[in-house]
Image (cartoon, rainbow, N blue to C red):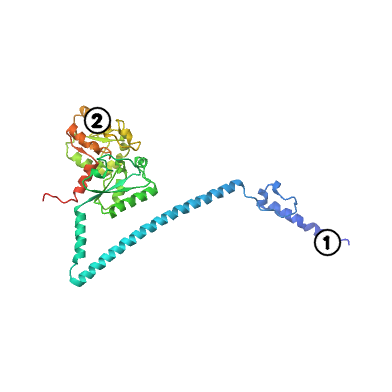
Amino acid sequence: MVPSPREQMLQQMVPSPREQVQHQMALSPRMQQTPTASAPPDAGSYPQEPMVTLKDYHLLHQMHRDLITKMAELQGRHTELLCNHQELIVAHSDVLNMASGLQLQLAAGGTAGPASAAIEDEASKKKGHPTLGVIRVDYNYPPADGDVDCPGSFGYEVTYRVIPGLTFEMAQMGRFTEEVERRFAEGIKYLEQKKVSAITSDCGLLMAFQVMARKIATAPVFMSAMIQCPIIAAAFDPADKILVLTLDGPTLHKQKNVLMNTCGFDVEEDRFIIQGCRHLPGFDAVARGQTVPVETAQPALVKFVLDTLKSNFSIRALLLESTELPPFADALRAATDLPVWDSITAADFYISGYKDNPRF
């Protein structure tokens, strides 16, 4: 049957199904981006979804690994928080039990009784035996007698706390990472839980964190022997000079702002003569994590100081900044007949404020 002229006109205006599919493919952005080579043989069929490229796969795989790593890190922090919380619960329970026992004894007899006397006696013992707390860098070496890391260097009990991640290099830079800063705060709180009387460190470069430590701790904090600068300088005439011995002179100069603000020490002041000792025989063992050989280092250090005194007649005192120099303090006192202050004398000064005077 031959279509009428009107039907022929309508057929020309309305596209066929195949023409409609081709028109939609032309308008689709996705199909514009799809290479023609990937199209199916049948041009009249509907377009397929684009394939995932190798680059996209690697990107998704890396994102998946990053998420797994982050989840593991968060899980570790969560576990640590749970452990800390458990310790707090145990401590809180002990305090409640002690308080409950005292209340029962007071209600029964009107006095605190034997339990309270035992507690007071224990508190009295702790009060009569002060303890020093030491923050340690994450650096292991065999300390010599007289070193801060040697418990036998002190005439009182010492509690140590290593800060994981706090390397010697980080101490030189004078900057914490976020994680190490958190561990540093936890380390100070740990020492205070141990009822230490004062807190110091086993690295003089941690003076860069003196202000931070002071904000966290309630006990006296002195992160370096340099804290003694004001009282040493005040005891001598302004024209007298003070020899400061350190293992790393340039790093000490970098901390001049901290030293000025925390202990009134100006590294640029002519009154303080700063001398590094790392170049002397024996002290290279520090960089290798070994014990400094006293039999080699001591004669070299004494000679170095005596030569310095010959060229500076106005030197009246010595201050050993490094925590690895106190083992040589006695030899320097004997050779120079001058007063020598170091990390040990700083600790003795603060601890003495908590000790009973045996003479009266």
Query: Callout 1, which amino acid?
Result: Glu
Mark 2 neighbour class, 10 Å CA radius: few under 14, some 14 to 19, many 20 or more? some
- The CA span between labels 2 and 1 is 118 Å
Give the residue pinned by disc 2. 299
Q: Which of the 4 image quadrants contains residue 149?
A: top left
In what element is the residue under mark 2? helix
Where in the figure is residue 244, as x and y percent of width and height? 25, 35
Q: Which mark is residue 7?
A: 1
Q: Between tags 2 and 1, which lies in front?
A: 2
Circles 2, 1 touching at the beta carbon (< 8 Å): no
In what element is the residue under mark 1? helix
* Closer to us: 126 or 342: 126
* Closer to us: 286 or 27: 286
Counting residues from the N terminus, which is met first, the one under dot 2 or under dot 1? 1
The N terminus is located in which quarter?
bottom right
One can see residue 317 in this view? no
